[in-house]
């Protein structure tokens, strides 16, 4: 199996693990997996039983709802797409999944930057006058960094393989075949433009005057012995 495909598969598996941990005064409040950030929905709190104890009897407890996070959705889509490409495309076209891996890493980093917005989902659990940013902490978990690392390594391996094989496996260009008619027409045009010098025929050569004998030979013949 291709090494780059293994890395992209690791990214997909990491989404099923906790990406972020929400805590309050070093107490775990909730855990957010990558899939939960992709599909959204209710988040089960780790301190649900304690919250129910301090809630009024007549007040119904509800889990906070997390909205779909676009950057998490993009990162998961890129991981699936890159995995399909490295399994389907010839190795000389590996530059494409290598480039889109960069988009996947950027999406995860932007998700990490904007994750504090999720705190607003927990506001109904506290007094509206309380600043949640001061009491709640969201920390990235090892699975989140594993997804980043697998994306980077997958992109590096596909980039190296693509660059190496694109130059080696490139088919040699065959010379273009020129049609015989085209060559003939070109020769005719060239002859018409640059006519050949006139030559003597065999009959013309017979009519030529005889060459004069070499004077030196004549003198030798006339010299008495």
Image: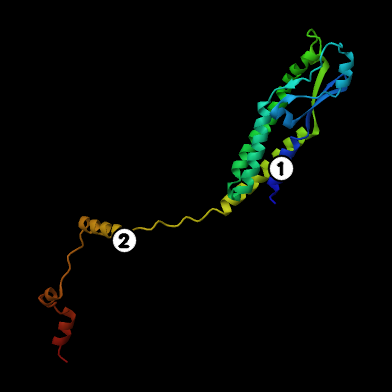
Viewer-side label of 1, 2:
1
Residue 7, above or below 70: below
Identify the disc placed on residue 137: none
Q: Nearer the viewer, residue 182 or 12?
A: 12
Residue 2 vertical position relative to residue 118 in the rendered view, above or below: below
Q: Which residue is mark 2?
A: 180
Residue 92 image position (x, y, % from top left): 58, 49
What residue is shown at x 74% (from left), y 38% (from top)?
149
Which part of the image, by quadrant, shows the C terminus? bottom left
Its colouring scheme is: rainbow
Q: Residue at x 52, y 55 (%)?
A: 171
Q: Residue at x 61, y 38 (%)?
A: 99
Q: Of callouts 1 and 2, which one flags the residue occurring earlier in the amino acid sequence?
A: 1
- Binning the other alpha carbons within 10 Å of mark 2 as few (below 14), some (14 to 19) or many (20 upward) gives few
Estimate the x, y position of residue 161 in percent, counting from the top left: 64, 48
Q: Name the outermost residue toward the top.
A: 129
On the image, the x and y values in percent for residue 13 come to: 74, 39
Q: Residues within 10 Å of mark 1 (few under 14, many from 20)?
A: some
| Residue 165 image point, x, y percent | 60, 51
* Residue 206 appearing in the image: yes
Residue 154, picture quadrant: top right
Q: Nearer the viewer, residue 209 or 203?
A: 203
Q: Residue furthest front?
A: 58
Instruction: Give the residue number, with chain letter if any, for mark 1.
Output: 9
Position above or below: 106 against 173: above
């Amino acid at each position: 199996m291709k090494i780059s495909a293994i890395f992209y598969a690791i990214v997909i598996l990491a989404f099923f693990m906790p990406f972020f941990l929400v805590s309050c005064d070093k107490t775990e409040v909730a855990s957010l997996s990558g899939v939960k950030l992709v599909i959204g929905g209710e988040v089960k709190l780790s301190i649900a039983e304690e919250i129910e104890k301090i809630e009024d009897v007549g007040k119904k407890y509800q889990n906070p709802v997390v909205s779909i996070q676009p950057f998490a959705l993009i990162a998961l889509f890129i991981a699936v797409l890159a995995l399909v490409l490295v399994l389907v495309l010839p190795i000389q076209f590996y530059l494409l999944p290598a480039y889109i891996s960069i988009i996947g890493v950027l999406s995860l980093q932007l998700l990490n930057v904007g994750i504090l917005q999720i705190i607003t989902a927990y506001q109904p659990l506290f007094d509206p006058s309380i600043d949640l940013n001061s009491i709640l902490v969201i920390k990235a978990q090892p699975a989140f960094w594993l997804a980043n690392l697998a994306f980077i390594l997958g992109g590096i391996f596909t980039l190296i393989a693509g660059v190496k094989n694109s130059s080696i496996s490139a088919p040699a260009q065959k010379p273009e075949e020129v049609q015989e008619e085209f060559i003939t027409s070109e020769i005719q045009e060239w002859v018409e433009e640059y006519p050949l010098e006139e030559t003597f025929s065999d009959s013309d050569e017979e009519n030529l005057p005889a060459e004069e004998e070499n004077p030196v030979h004549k003198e030798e013949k006339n010299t008495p012995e």
